Amino acid sequence: MKKEEQAGTFRFPAVRLTRLARVLGAVAVAAAVAACSMETATSPVSDAGGVRAANVLPGSERLASERLASGLVRTKPITSPLTARATFTAKGGKLVIKELGVTLTVPANALPRDTMTITMTALPGAMVVYEFEPHGTVFRTPLTLSHKLKGTKYDPTQDGRFGGHFTDRSKVDNLKGQVRITETASPFIANGSFNFKIGHFSGWMMSSGFADEM
């Protein structure tokens, strides 16, 4: 008996070692590919401001860089922030600021966790602009933001309307009536309201078009 065998050491033939290495290597590659695929499917997209954002909804567009959007204007500006807050469960529900004619509809099973307290704040000024919390929240299914056209200077002849996403209040310029946005959302007019779908927070506005196109 050889000394290596006496010491409890066993040598695989070189051919077997080569085959074993190939098998183990193939398994490792497959595992890495699977892990990357899972990450791509579940990881949220980040915008330029570091705010998590859901994939852009059909008919909407994530802008390559910030653009100035002109806001839909109220007939009577608000002088101070107005806030509504409610806790939602998987059943969904609605958050309303009745005096402004705005409604946020949360569908069933849209929340990223079992319960969530959502805050909607109308920013002061003439523009129809709202801020939502928790900042950066990404929803499983889109929410609907609706605003009554009554009480606004809505012009049905304008064809540049859209919803616009902004990252924080510093992007809102009330003096010029403009907001720096990073994403547009396709609107639809129904039941006397301006409506569009949103997949994430933080800020959203009702726009009458891009400032440089008006």
Image (tube, rainbow, N blue to C red):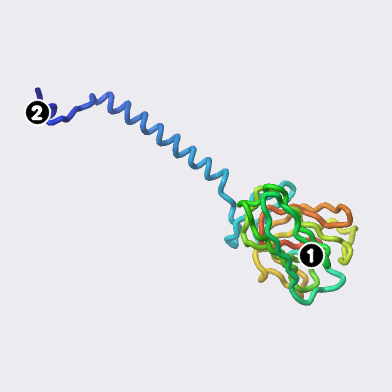
Residue 112: give x, y in percent of width and height: 62, 51
Disc sitting over residue 198 in the figure: none
Residue pictured at 10% horizontal, 25% vertical: 2
Report, in whole angstroms, how far the alpha carbon at label 1 lies from the one at label 2.
86 Å
Question: Mark 2 highlights which residue?
Answer: 3
Residue pictured at 74% horizontal, 54% vertical: 93
Earlier in the chain: of badge 1 and badge 2, it is: 2
Mark 1 residue type: Ile
Dividing the picture into quadrants, the one containing residue 6 is top left
Residue pictured at 78% horizontal, 73% vertical: 125
Dividing the picture into quadrants, the one containing residue 145 is bottom right
Disc sitting over residue 97 in the figure: 1
Q: Are marks 1 and 2 in contact (CB under 8 Å)?
A: no
Question: Where is 137 relative to 29, above or below?
Answer: below
Q: On the picture, is 23 further left or further right than 119?
A: left
Question: Where is 203 relative to 81, above or below?
Answer: above
Residue 148: give x, y in percent of width and height: 85, 60
